[in-house]
Image: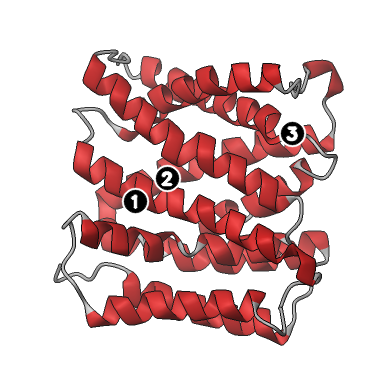
């Protein structure tokens, strides 16, 4: 899971390389989610409830887990190295923790606070005076990418607060992808950013592959949670970040300064400190 999930930042980097507008890419990402989730849902003999509570659930997951974070990710990926994107996505649990504290889903913890502090220091190492970025003018896009991590952190807390309404994860992905597609289609139309089938090249195939990989690994993640529990499954965060950096080096030839490697190490330490523990 870590190896396949970690390749998605590289695929996204390739997808945005030709200047496609994020809304056009979001349409494809949600369309893939609708097709794959729909096939699995109906093959299992289940349906997609459309009551008002369920529609609210789909809308929340679509906005926090697809439309907003994808818009921010696709925008930032055009300007940042894929390896940096992989490191920044590791901040998701560090954003999730303070949100959970505010919503009283978690108890205050010194260890987790120190973990979040490690994440903050990692950001400083990337965007500080001796920036770890290849171009210091790209600092602003780091904060755009951080917005995606904030959205994902909010998504988990939204699900904890609102509940899954008796649905399994694939059904939720089906509904959220459908709502996300409905939102993205008019936005792509207004901005004239549709990516037609007769113009399929490597970048377009990359975003479709990234969507398939993300969907498949998420399904595997849910399966691991059922077999071994959420604490064990959460260890994949280390591997997603680590493999993301490795894939970027192997496939895109990216190389990083000492500041980025220090940020990478701090981020892994932060994940270890912020993650839930067995006793909790």
Q: CA distance from mark 1 to mark 3?
A: 35 Å
Tag 2–tag 1 contact (CB < 8 Å): yes
Q: Residue at x 44, y 61 (%)?
A: 236
Question: Between residues 79 and 221, which one lies in front from this camera angle?
Answer: 79
Q: Quadrant of residue 102?
A: bottom left
Q: Secondary structure at mark 3?
A: loop
Residue 169 against residue 105 in the figure, above or below: above
Circle nearer the N terminus (3, 2): 3
Mark 3 nearby-residue class (10 Å; few <14, some 14–19, many ≥20): some
Residue 104 against residue 167 in the figure, above or below: below
Q: Residue at x 26, y 67 (%)?
A: 276
Residue 264 against residue 48 in the figure, above or below: below
Q: CA distance from mark 3 to mark 2?
A: 30 Å
Mark 2 nearby-residue class (10 Å; few <14, some 14–19, many ≥20): some
Circle nearer the N terminus (1, 3): 3
> Is 165 left or right of 197, judged from the image as shown?
left
Residue 183 against residue 91 in the figure, above or below: above
In this view of the protein, can residue 187 be seen by the observer?
yes
Tag 3–tag 2 contact (CB < 8 Å): no
Mark 1 — residue? Answer: 224
Q: Residue at x 67, y 61 (%)?
A: 140
Mark 3 — residue? Answer: 21
Question: Between residues 265 and 46, which one lies in front from this camera angle?
Answer: 265
Q: Quadrant of residue 125?
A: bottom right
The quadrant the C terminus occupies is bottom left
Give the x, y percent position of residue 80: 73, 60
Mark 2 — residue? Answer: 220
């Amino acid at each position: 899971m870590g190896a396949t999930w970690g390749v998605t930042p590289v695929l996204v980097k390739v997808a945005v390389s030709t200047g496609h507008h994020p809304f056009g890419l979001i349409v494809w990402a949600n369309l893939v989610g609708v097709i794959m989730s729909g096939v699995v849902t109906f093959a299992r003999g289940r349906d997609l409830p459309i009551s008002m509570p369920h529609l609210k659930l789909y809308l929340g997951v679509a906005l926090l887990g697809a439309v907003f974070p994808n818009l921010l990710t696709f925008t930032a990926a055009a300007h940042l190295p894929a390896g940096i994107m992989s490191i920044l996505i590791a901040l998701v649990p560090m954003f999730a923790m303070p949100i959970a504290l505010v919503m009283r889903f978690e108890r205050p913890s010194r260890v987790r606070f120190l973990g979040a502090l490690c994440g903050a220091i990692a950001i400083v190492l990337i965007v500080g005076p001796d920036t770890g970025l290849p171009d210091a003018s790209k600092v602003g896009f780091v904060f755009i990418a951080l917005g995606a991590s904030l959205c994902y952190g909010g998504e988990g807390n939204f699900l904890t607060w609102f509940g899954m309404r008796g649905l399994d994860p694939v059904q939720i992905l089906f509904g959220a992808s459908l709502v996300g597609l409905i939102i993205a289609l008019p936005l792509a139309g207004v901005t004239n950013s549709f990516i037609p089938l007769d113009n399929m090249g490597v970048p377009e195939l990359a975003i479709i592959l990234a969507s398939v990989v993300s969907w498949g690994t998420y399904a595997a993640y849910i399966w691991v949670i059922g077999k071994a529990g959420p604490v064990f499954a959460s260890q994949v965060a280390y591997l997603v970040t680590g493999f993301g950096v490795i894939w970027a080096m192997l496939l895109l030839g990216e190389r990083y300064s000492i500041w980025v490697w220090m940020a990478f190490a701090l981020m892994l330490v932060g994940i270890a400190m912020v993650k839930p523990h067995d006793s909790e």
